[in-house]
Image: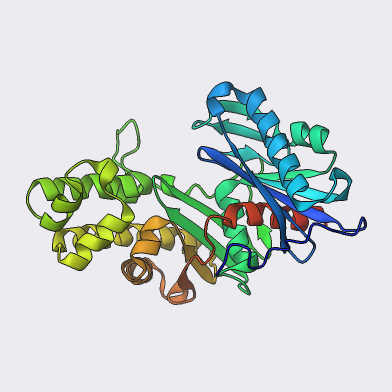
Amino acid sequence: MSKDQGKNTDNEHSPDLKVWVGLDLGGTKMLAKVFDEQFRELGSAKKKTEGHRGMEAGLKRMAKAIEAALKDAGVDKSQVHGIGVGCPGPVDADKGIIVEAPNLGWKKAPVVKSLEKAIGAPVVICNDVDSGVFAEYEFGAAKGAKSVVGIFPGTGIGGGAVINGRLLQGANLSCMEIGHIPLFPETGSKDGGPTLEIAASRLAIAAEAAQAAYRGQAPHLLEACGTDISNITSGKLAAAIEAGDQAIEDIMKKAANLLGAGVATVVHLLAPDMIVLGGGLVEAMPDIYLKGVKDSANARLLGPYRNTFKVVAAELEDDAGVKGAAAWARRALT
């Protein structure tokens, strides 16, 4: 599919056109996109996040990214229905602030106040994983589901949920921090013992895979990557399994089994009809993850909860967060 497929490239719009804007603030770049009321893409812009320049400078760059996307779309600020922003870290949606974004060095960032002043349109914020899950619910793998939980194993393990068409959000903070579910909590341990994220994230998998390569148990991975975990990507892990590194396959199955334990906890709490798994690990090894997670969860569930949900791979790619943020703004503001 071409990049322009589904994108309205005609910048001659009626002045009566109203648009929704999404902004995904994550990683080293921020992405802004403009959508019409049928959620066809009209324009987009990218800016470097440059969190090292400070919070105030970052907030200004967010406004500039939105302004650039509006210019690309050929629409005016006055035509903006609303803006949705997917933010890293915990957010207080009612106060409109990012409570803390460690990767940016921000605390209590007044995103809503800053953008509403700059753009002159209502702004809604949510956690960036929440926006990705909402996109899958509205447009992707979970379209048509009643209640959805999304889990994205990567450097950490992020989670989000849509219950009866609404993002699940806490009273004071965004929630669904699935990666911090404790595993095997140890009495007397100051840190409470290992968490799901510590045991089953891509970083944990890469570290264990590097040890296997060092011990000679994964010769194909050793040849491709050495033992430097920064070189051990999801694709390289998948290739090593395909080439016959049984130790790497065992590591991946163990990680899927542990993730399934977390899913069982979530199913007992929320009883969703759909679990969406996304991220590079799932994309590279869908068969191992989808079956492994579902089998592991069902083995731990009370009888009535078994097989009451589907486990599917996320369908949307890098644009999920920005589209989901805009879609959540539409849902929250109308």
Horizontal and vertical percent position of residue 192: 35, 37
What quarter of the picture does the N terminus occupy? bottom right
Query: Residue drawn at (32%, 45%), measured in percent from left and top?
Result: 203
Q: Is residue 87 visible?
A: no
Horizontal and vertical percent position of residue 215: 7, 48
Which image quarter: residue 66? top right
In this view, the residue in front, 297 or 77, is 77
Q: Is residue 31 visible?
A: yes
Q: Is residue 37 left or right of residue 156?
A: right
What quarter of the picture does the C terminus occupy? bottom right
Horizontal and vertical percent position of residue 109: 65, 29
Vertical position of residue 122 compared to residue 8: above or below: above
Query: Residue drawn at (63%, 68%), measured in percent from left and top?
Result: 5
Which image quarter: residue 42? bottom right
In this view, the residue farthest toward the left is 216
Query: Residue drawn at (57%, 39%), measured in percent from left and top?
Result: 90
Vertical position of residue 313 compared to residue 319: above or below: below
